[in-house]
Amino acid sequence: MKLNTKANIDNTDDFYETLIEFHRGLSDEESLKANAKLVLLLANHIGDQEVIAEAMAIAHNVGNKE
């Protein structure tokens, strides 16, 4: 399986609002912990280490010019 990097969420505005609500009321530390838990849950759901490693590499390079 290859990582799907094309838009794959039906309503991105609703997703973004849900993500904002997910963090509402959390301290910075709580927000970081919640993000870590979410990443681990989603990685477990994906289950393919190659896909997860590809996602990590892409995420690690966000903002870097290649």
Image (cartoon, rainbow, N blue to C red):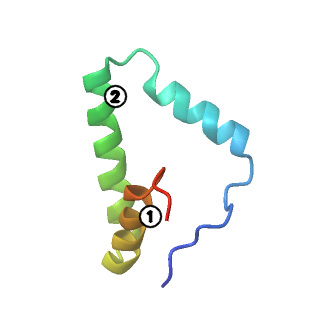
- Circle 2 sits in a helix, a strand or a loop, which is it? helix
- Disc assigned to residue 4: none
Residue 1's spot in the image, x, y percent?
48, 85
Q: Is residue 42 above or below residue 16?
A: below
Residue 25's spot in the image, x, y percent?
41, 14
Residue 37's spot in the image, x, y percent?
29, 44
Tag 2: Cα neighbours inside 10 Å, few (<14), some, or many (≥20)?
some
Compare residues 34 and 6 and report the one nearer the observer: 6
Snapshot quadrant of residue 5: bottom right
Q: Is residue 62 above or below residue 43?
A: above
Task: Name the residue: 57% across, 72% down.
Answer: 4
Task: Name the residue: 35% across, 62% down.
Answer: 43
- Circle 1 sits in a helix, a strand or a loop, which is it? helix
Task: Name the residue: 26% across, 35% down.
Answer: 33
Of the residues shown, which amino acid type is indicated by label 1? Ile
Judged left or right of residue 65, residue 56 is: left
Snapshot quadrant of residue 31: top left
In space, the residues marked 2 and 1 are separated at their CA atoms by 22 Å
Q: Where does label 2 land, which residue? A: 31
Q: Where does label 1 land, which residue? A: 58
Residue 30's spot in the image, x, y percent?
28, 25
